[in-house]
Image: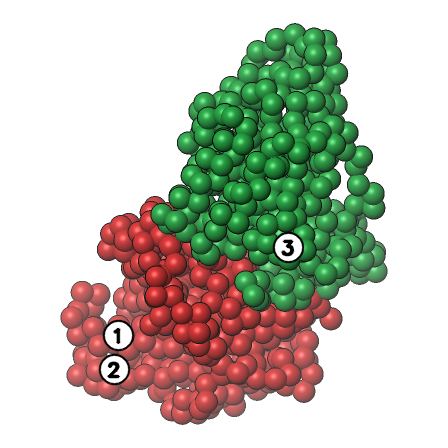
Chain colours: A green, B red
Amino acid sequence: MSGSISPLAPKTYAEMPPVRGVRMATAAAGIKYKNRTDVLMMVFDRPATVAGVFTRSKCPSAPVDFCRANLPGGIARAVVVNSGNANAFTGRKGRESTKMTAEAAAKAIGCAESEVFLASTGVIGEPLDATKFSGVLDGLASNGTEDFWFEAAKAIMTTDTYPKVATRTAELGGVTVRINGIAKGAGMIAPDMATMLSFVVTDAAIPASVLQSLLSAGVGPTFNSVTVDSDTSTSDTLMLFATGAAEGQATVTADDASLDGFRSALNDLLRDLALQVVRDGEGARKMVAVTVEGAENDEAAKRIALSIANSPLVKTAVAGEDANWGRIVMAVGKSGEMADRDRLAIWFGDVRVAVDGERDPTYSEAAATAVMKQEDIPVRVEIGLGNGRATVWTCDLTKEYVEINGDYRS
Amino acid sequence: MSGSISPLAPKTYAEMPPVRGVRMATAAAGIKYKNRTDVLMMVFDRPATVAGVFTRSKCPSAPVDFCRANLPGGIARAVVVNSGNANAFTGRKGRESTKMTAEAAAKAIGCAESEVFLASTGVIGEPLDATKFSGVLDGLASNGTEDFWFEAAKAIMTTDTYPKVATRTAELGGVTVRINGIAKGAGMIAPDMATMLSFVVTDAAIPASVLQSLLSAGVGPTFNSVTVDSDTSTSDTLMLFATGAAEGQATVTADDASLDGFRSALNDLLRDLALQVVRDGEGARKMVAVTVEGAENDEAAKRIALSIANSPLVKTAVAGEDANWGRIVMAVGKSGEMADRDRLAIWFGDVRVAVDGERDPTYSEAAATAVMKQEDIPVRVEIGLGNGRATVWTCDLTKEYVEINGDYRS
């Protein structure tokens, strides 16, 4: 946890109401941090259905392996999350650590180990001593309360400067259901499936297979459309649980039109959390929304947008409040996607800075610079070739990013 | 040109002897910089053969378009290079500017416009006023001298902190021939064909088609294996000229074994210049050589090595002298190439820090940190799957990089 809070932090945090069917508790186990909570346990007293998406890294963490193995069962009774150590690239010791944690959690709850899900975040490569917190799981299991979302979000923070929470409601099967979510993440953010850690719970009753479809579709324009530094974590984990504790809800199936409202609320919540992650990007002072239109197709638009959003030269120019649109041209050019230089147009906010392959004839440095001084900077690029469209979000690259990451382990 | 010279600059510069058949002169035209030379003209009094490789950017500069159009002719009489303005994304004005420059150069030399080659480096998107230097080309053409390589390298600098020169000799066709080269580049360096600007001249007599084969093969393990910031320039241009002025040389053909010595000397020179570019990476304080072995094949090894070399988290850790090998694991994992976490081994210098998918049992933080304190840091990763091998070179990511690029245009 960094000393000062990101200037892009929410001015107010969402009030997080309980979600029926899930209880939470946290503990300070001293895994790496002193004087703060670093273990979170979520308990589903009745089995919840579960869906998950994970990092596409070829070197995933031990907890990611563990969750992937349990996911086909479709049932969750407990989630244990720790910060301060990612339990990634820890070999046999890492697997033993996940097994010890799952055993302790299953024993505390009275469930099968296959109904436990785990996540760890923090330093890669250091062995995780699970004995540090396996002893507290009994207490956490019995002390959990429904009204603990904000504290839960705080316990999973690493270099985050603020906790990330969001809540929505939707009409489903004749009743109002709730969706709550928390997330953590600030660096090593270029999700290629999910980003870092995020846990979303609804009290709706939704079969695991339907839940998985909703989640897999939902991450594309949300968590998979944000990038802080183009580095994909070994630990990315996004899980969605449905407790079914909202009373009186009718059964839903995959092709049920009644899911539309829920889907929409879920996607809105995922986007909210994903943008909170970018706004807490390490060292971030500005948020950039990059929209690419007129590309060959949507996939091409997204690749061009990510090429812009990941460019160190674009990001340092944003940090310097420099309307250096030439670097946008560079990033379009290097993306490898179809582009015709002489059809390109570029906007900063509402200010068109380039058109037809050259500087806009009415270009005003003052107008462009005024946009760059904003906290939120919309960048739009018109490729002029087709109907492909995508938006991705990133932050600027500042000296503070270099400082935070120059000596993270110590 | 930055205020202080990179700590990684060569301790001494190569003595640059003349290459028969090429003369050079420079001028201070005030294109962007004050009180320094910013135009270079190279003149081949007798037609030289020419080869070139250029940026793969879809938004190349006007001079890149111009050179591509002239290259099939295979003959060069003049090269005009300016710094301070890239003449990229300048539309019709950009094409007019290249035409005006080529006309003036052709008139000064008495050659065809198709025998003129152009390159520009600097800000993207600003119209380039070619009248600023087209008037001086007459003088440059007549005043050029053979003994001017170091000054030539200085005239093409932008954010470079030192000029980049290299020279080699080789035996070819019974005589000793010379190869001289200059390069510029410090930021926007992730060549995807060549990097920034580099001009190499030999007095050997080599047909253009053979020259092109040599150059195209030579860039792979040299200029195309370095990265400063993963950003590919719109202007990357590497050209090789053969004046044929070395007297008495026998004719060579593409499959001539006598080319071996020349090829080897050329590749060595290209590598020398490419590494000089990385060592002048914007804000660089350390140089990192990333070697990946045991990958599925050489291409996979190079992609993994570039994933490591381009990772902001790896580069900031190097800047902080932090032996954070967990980030190497992360970068291997995100590369998308085949990897088996539990077979990975990682070395910093001679210190093995990880093996068999976890921290080395004999890991010594002190030994690893001692390597990180070096100016030159070798990183080696053994994938353990095949025989693929590649080395790429990069530099660290420092606060100075952010500072240099936060306000480049002003």
Quadrant of the snapshot with the N terminus of chain B: bottom right
Chain ID of residue with mark 3: A
Q: Which mark is residue B264?
A: 1
Q: Position of residue A74 (x, y in %)?
A: 49, 22
Q: Are marks 3 and 1 on the same chain?
A: no
Near-viewer residue (B64 or B21): B64
Label 3 element class: loop
Q: Is residue A207 visible?
A: yes
Near-viewer residue (A306 or A225): A225
**A78 lies above or below A159:** above
Label 1 element class: helix
Q: Earlier in the sequence, mark 1 or mark 2?
A: 2
Residue position for label 3: A159
Disc 1 to disc 2: CB gap under 8 Å: yes
Near-viewer residue (B277 or B103): B277
Amino acid at the residue labelled 1: Ser
**B151 lies above or below B320:** below
Residue shown at the point (70%, 22%) measured from the top left: A20
Amino acid at the residue labelled 2: Ala
C-alpha gap between disc 1 and disc 2:
8 Å
Residue position for label 2: B170
Q: Is residue B124 visible?
A: no
**A109 lies above or below B318:** above
Q: Would you identify the image quadrant in which residue B220 lies?
A: bottom left
